[in-house]
Amino acid sequence: MGQTPEYEVVVVGAGFGGLGAAIALRAAGLTDFVILERAADIGGTWRDNTYPDVAVDLPSFTYQFSFAPNPRWSRVFPKGAEVKAYIDHLADRYQLRQHLRLNTEMTAREWDEVNHLWRLHLGDGSVLTARFVLTALGAFVDPKRPDIPGLAEFTGKVVQTARWDHGHDLSGERVAVIGTGSTAVQLVPKVARVASRLTVFQRRAIWVFAKPDLKIPPVLQTLFARVPAVQRAVRAVTSAVVEALLVGTVVLGKPGSVVAKIAETGIRAYLRTQVADPVLRAKLIPDYGFGCKRPSVSNTYYRTYTRPNVDLVTEGIERITATGVRSRDGRLHEVDTLILATGFRLSNDPENYRKVPVRGRDGFDLAQFYAGNKVQAYEGVSIPKLPNSFFIFGPFSWTGSSWHVMVETQSHHAIRVITEARRRGATAVEVSQRANDRFFRFVHRRATGSLIMTNNCTGANTYYIDHHGDFSLLRPTTAWQAWRASRRFSLDDYTYRTVGQ
């Protein structure tokens, strides 16, 4: 019968994805599992990102699991500490801490075809075995250090936003921020209030909505707690609005669509109320269409650039020196602290799987596959030649409206397959090449026709586009279509085997 694995299921990662998958496993009666987490605490991005004013950029009503609504959100866009508290609450409420192994980093995993199990190599040199693996890496894996000449020569303080140094005081310092994505939108206004001089180096501007960040009054919180249907209704409405903006525009929209025009016109009008100087205002307007990159929200970002102690540099960086940053116009900007808000390595980057190799059946290597083939996975969950292996966030899986909806959808798919394998007495289950190819043709055709793949987005350098130039980060369908597919896909799209077959 082959070797018996130590666990039926291993979940890799203890962020929202891993915890959501673990909750789904328990709900399905699959309790023989362990959650591996390389850090000393749970929470993923909300554990790592503690920079000034870190917050959710989606309404709190949407940013939660459907089965575990939080009626006590203090505001529409909660701060990071409040989200981390929600994560801790989930771990306690669903008794997940007994399944956790913290400070446990997986360094490689390989499929044992003889015994139909996974061997997971850990950082301490030990090997753990499991029948099934649920990989719950988030979209953004590790922070990227920019490849800027001279960075290693800088003698001042360097701070990466995902590794914020709370012991370093920026008060009275000359500070430079490199990057103007969503993270910078949140932290720049806060840093500007304490720095003697703040210089922001912008490569590409970002579309920024006004942020209706209202406090949720206690009476409404009580109503949500006592009448959950009210909060579910609010969640449905906010999710629909978010999906209309992000999915309806980015995935299904076309250049010049009505929704994109309305959004862009609204942001330009908002910008005029924040910045009177037309020259400065022009620098803050992106040269790509709305929807090409994920927009952000803030009530203070634009007007921060009108402060006398803030400079916006758009000429580009020539190099970093020992004492500052030289822009391409020849000007040297003296700096005490350099803040890197330069993004992350995405989960479908082959480098992740060179660092942590994943080797499946018949010599399959995930890093080589992602490097040499268009990024793909059946329903965003499974890849041929990776038996008993499922992604929570895989290619073409995130609908963009709610991370939590995606986690619930993907978990349901994986558990349907695991449950069917158990019912059939199978020890190995693997998606067929034909089913994978069919799904890839479906999503690739829709993705190729999306707004992202048009000339309207040329030069946006959006992370929506992968290293092959494909739009694989988001699923080019609605969340409803993905949810429905997770419940209706044919279980015969997988092959089932027992040890010895």
Image (cartoon, helix red, strand yellow):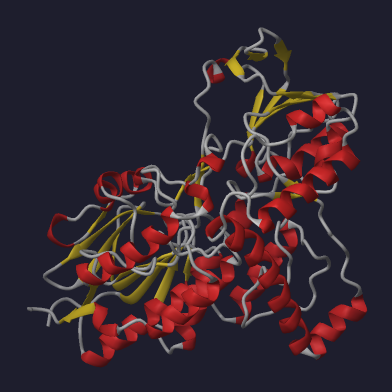
Residue at image location 73% in from the left, 42% down from the top: 185
The total number of labels drawn is: 0
Q: Where is residue 496? Give x, y as percent.
A: 19, 81
Describe residue 136's horizontal placement relative to residue 199 as left or right: left
Describe residue 248's horizontal placement relative to residue 332 as left or right: left
325, 303: nearer the viewer? 303
495, 117: nearer the viewer? 495
Q: Identify the image quadrant of the C terminus.
A: bottom left
User: Is residue 70 something that shows in the picture?
Assistant: no
Residue most toward the left? 500
Q: Identify the image quadrant of the N terminus.
A: bottom left
In the displayed structure, 499 sits above or below 261; it is below
In the displayed structure, 54 sits above or below 90; it is above
Quarter of image, res 188? top right
Quarter of image, res 183? top right
Q: Where is residue 211? Give x, y as percent.
A: 81, 55
In the displayed structure, 291 sits above or below 147; it is below
Residue at image location 23% in from the left, 65% down from the top: 384
